[in-house]
Image (cartoon, rainbow, N blue to C red):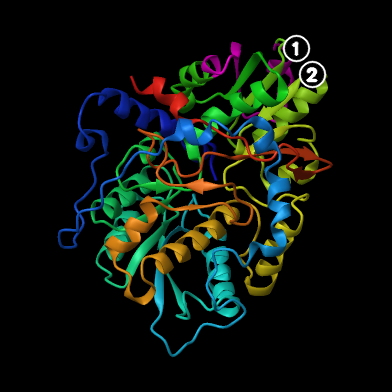
Amino acid sequence: MSPKSRLRFFTAGLLALALVAASCGDDDDDAAPAAPEPTAAAPAEAPAEEPMDDDDDHADDDDDDHADHDDDHADHDDDHADEAMDDSDGAMADESMEPVKIGLIAQVEELMAFPEVPAVAQAYVDYFNAEHGGANGHPIELEVCGAGDAVESHIACANEFVNADDINVVINGGFLSNSIASGTILAEAGKANLGLGNDFIDYLTPNLYNFDPGLPGLAQVFFVFASERRDVSTMSLYLADDPAIAPFEPALYAIAENNGITINETIFLGFEPDLTGPISAADTSNDGWLFVLADGAQCTAAAAGAATVGYEGHLFANDLCAGQDVVESGVLDGWSVPIVSSAPTVDGGAEIDEIHRVLDTYGGPGVQTAGLAGWALAQVFIARDLLVEGGGADATAESVLTALSTYSRSDIPGYPEVSCPGPDPWLGACNTSPLMVTVVDGQMTGPDGFTFLDFSQLNFLLG
């Protein structure tokens, strides 16, 4: 994956943010990005959504609660697979019954390819069919539509599922503008869409729901975690030296300040193998250094430079530094990194052991626990729940979307508690707790558990 491709993770959010800021005070149609009209007939009107009273719901969620999240999961590990399952636990799906289907838009072609998504999704579909009776006895089928870098392929997949009467929930693994275009089509057609939340706009569009904190969460989690868990008040910011990332710098400064952290310098890093020079110019008296970089090679060079300088403060990096090869090399030992998809760590206990068992038993050669694997398995859990609640074989697009609009669950493996909708106006923020991992001896550990994010604290960005 090229540096510029990876940088789009961060720059796309600012492009969307500019759209949102420009539309403050306008209606929802103005706030949403333009997308081709779906080829389906006019969709049924989605049910009205009541904003969740987020402040009241989370007033009792202090830091200790979230730091102990993994312990809470351990308490119900033995019962985990039984909660929220139907009476057919332990039984195979009845292949003579009509199947229920889950759509998946999988970005598996060209530069931005994530083959772990369909591989893990299929493994969990097979697991449910073999051990939990599918969905109320009906076998579950995964319909995969492969897409690439071009937005047209994602639009085609969205229209395919809009026109499929037997598919009422879609897992949308598209990235950046691709997910916005396809997600908007699905939302406008009244199809339940489980997205990645690549952009700020994904959280502000009616009927778009995301079970990953995504870009807004990543922008916020650095500073929430650094302030609340590491007592950081001053920070140096390292950014990949590319014009595409420049628009994101002021947003990072603003979000940091909103969380009581002062970024007092920005140092741009190139892509040369030795970055000791620019890193040695940084203020070592700052409590923390935050690296927002483009790929594993740049992260490795930056980590080596920080080690050479001998910086003893807190080190943070974006998730693109948490590739398996970089982590296992040991260069990030002691660093803290947000994991977008709540991937299993080495200290997860029985719950994480169960994930590995399922993947080992039902997974094929493309299965892995890195990348978006954790996100993919959670989406299958959620999609199955929605189909069951929406009526199983009798489910409709409207009934499944209704189930999604009030969905909540606290026992998805490797995931925090999730609930829809999110706090107004971030209605799509159904997951507000990314996992922060700390690298120890070349392995990702989760001593701090999930970090709660109050999305309403980002309201100041909306103008």
Image location of residue 274, percent across then percent down: 73, 26
Contact check, label 1 and label 2, Cβ < 8 Å: yes
Residue 311: assigned label:
2
From what the image shows, is residue 20 above or below residue 6? above
Q: Does residue 219 appear to the left or right of 161 in the view shown?
A: right
Give the residue drawn at x 41%, y 86%. Answer: 97
109 displayed left or right of 224 = left
Residue 418: percent from left, percent from top: 51, 47
For label 2, the crowd category at 10 Å Cα-Cα, with few meaning under 14, some 14 to 19 and many 20 or more, is some
Identify the element where label 2 is drawn: loop
Sequence-wise first label, 1 or 2: 1
Label 1 CA crowd tier, 10 Å (few <14, some 14–19, many 20+): some
Measure the C-alpha gap from mark 1 to mark 2: 6 Å
Residue 268 is covered by the magenta coloring: yes
Q: Which mark is residue 406?
A: none
Looking at the picture, how far across and down is residue 440, in whole percent? 81, 39
Task: Point out the stretch of residues depicted in magenta.
Answer: 256-282
Give the residue drawn at x 34%, y 37%.
Answer: 204
Query: Can residue 10 be seen in the rendering of this structure?
Result: no
Which of 300 and 89 lies nearest the eye of the viewer?
A: 89
The image quadrant of residue 361 is bottom right
The residue at which mark 1 appears reads as 284
Q: Position of residue 425 (x, y in %)?
A: 35, 33
Q: Quadrant of residue 173?
A: bottom left
Q: Quadrant of the C terminus?
A: top left
Could you tell me if residue 397 is visible in this image?
A: yes
- Magenta-drawn stretch contains 48: no
| Amino acid type, label 1 | Thr
Tell which of 164 and 354 is nearer to you.
354
Closest to the observer, 311 or 220: 220
